[in-house]
Amino acid sequence: MMNSSRKSVECDYVVIGGGIVGGCISYYLSRKNKEVICIDSGEFSGSNSNAGSIHVQLQSRNFRLNPHLIDNLLENLPFYKEAVNAWDRLRLMLNVDLDLRVNGGLMVADNEEQLEFLYKKCQEEKAAGLDVEIIESNKIKKVYPFLSNKVVGAEFCAHEGKLNPLVANKSLQEVSLRSGVKIMKCETVNHIEFKNNEYCIRTNLREYFCETVIIAAGSGSGKLAECLNFNIPTIAEPLHMNVTEKVSMFIPILIQHAERSITLKQISSGNIIIGGGWPAKIEEESNKIKIKKESLFGNLTTAVNLVPSIGKLRLYRTWGGINPITDGNSVLGNMKGHENVFFAIPGDAGYTLGPLCAEVIVDLINSKRNEFYSSKFSPERFLNNHKKMIIEN
């Protein structure tokens, strides 16, 4: 890393954000023999706190917490489906296992009302092109004996899976460094401006000058957009996660629930990672993520009710992470007047979408049309909404 004295640095691209999206963009750009600098504050990194789920089917928590986003999320299901293929392409590029297992995901129900909800959801997802089916209780007990006897049925989605985010993040960083990416850790971007026909990115340590900027800072992207007089609403949703001690493999599949907030998966090391959207909190004074006692007990109780044998295991670690929320759609692309500033903010389940969002952005930078890109992902939709609000008011 460069020394801490303030000085100017020239490069081809500056990527702001070192999570899975910014990391992939940096790596993909470096493969074109371009000089790439990736600036990572190290704060609120969704990638470093992710539970490792590969989501494709609609998550039930959004029906409860964000019902206004469901139409957008349903429309985006083919994008999520392709995101799984993008992970496989990344695995092949890195030549690392990543503990990536796409062997399906199960969303279970423990009463008839929940099962009816899954039937309706399954029909909509089939119409969107997903490989999904309802599994009745008799088959559930035979194929997945570790589940609670209260489970009356489930929806199976063939596209879902899991990976080890620690392995993925470390492998991506190592390959990026070998490819020439300069990763500037613990630097915070304070300002972005266009002057003398190039962009100046000012951090707490130095200034960077480049022709093209990619903003992939998750929930912090909205604040950076303000530097360029753009309004991109990004909300930081702090979430809670747990991991158990290592045990012999007995949960081969990603598990979710039709009503309760829960995700369960067991990685190849034997640890069981438990998440699913229970809230954490951001302390105002320290700006650090803190665990809420009710989320800790609620998340673990839900897990034990779903897979009773988990109750015998020791809790190894508990932590919190950030899920950025916009409007259910990813934010991908540039805006008029700043054609060389690209926003790369994945929609819900951002870790799942990370590599595909990176592919789309790199194609846009290279003036190529990615077949999975949609104009609804453009950040200009917020500009249009802002104009509409001004007219209405």
Image (cartoon, helix red, strand yellow):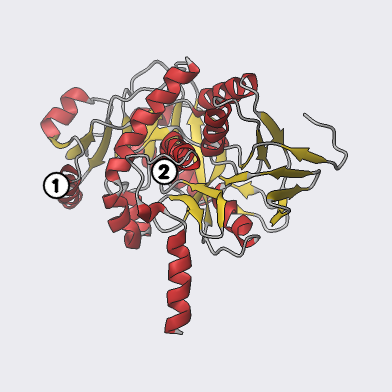
Q: How far is mark 1 from mark 2, CA to CA?
A: 21 Å
On screen, residue 147 above or below 8: above
Tell me where residue 231 appears, x and y as whole percent: 54, 64
- Judging by the rendered image, the residue that carries numbered circle 2 is 349
Tell me where residue 253 appears, x and y as whole percent: 31, 27
> Pointer 1: residues within 10 angstroms few (<14), some, or many (20+)?
some
On screen, residue 171 above or below 209: above
Tell me where residue 377 appears, x and y as whole percent: 40, 52
Left/right of residue 175 with respect to residue 297 in the rendered view: right
Quadrant hosting residue 85 = top left
Left/right of residue 345 with respect to residue 197 in the rendered view: left
Quadrant hosting residue 180 = top right
Q: Nearer the viewer, residue 86 or 340?
A: 340
At label 2, the amino acid type is Ala
What is the secondary structure assignment of the residue under circle 2? loop
- Judging by the rendered image, the residue that carries numbered circle 1 is 123
Disc 1 vs disc 2: Cβ atoms closer than 8 Å?
Answer: no
Q: Nearer the viewer, residue 260 or 47?
A: 47
Tell me where residue 164 appears, x and y as whole percent: 47, 25
> Pointer 2: residues within 10 angstroms few (<14), some, or many (20+)?
some
Name the residue: 51% across, 38% down.
Answer: 21
- The number of numbered discs placed on residues in the rendered structure image is 2
Q: Nearer the viewer, residue 7 or 266?
A: 7
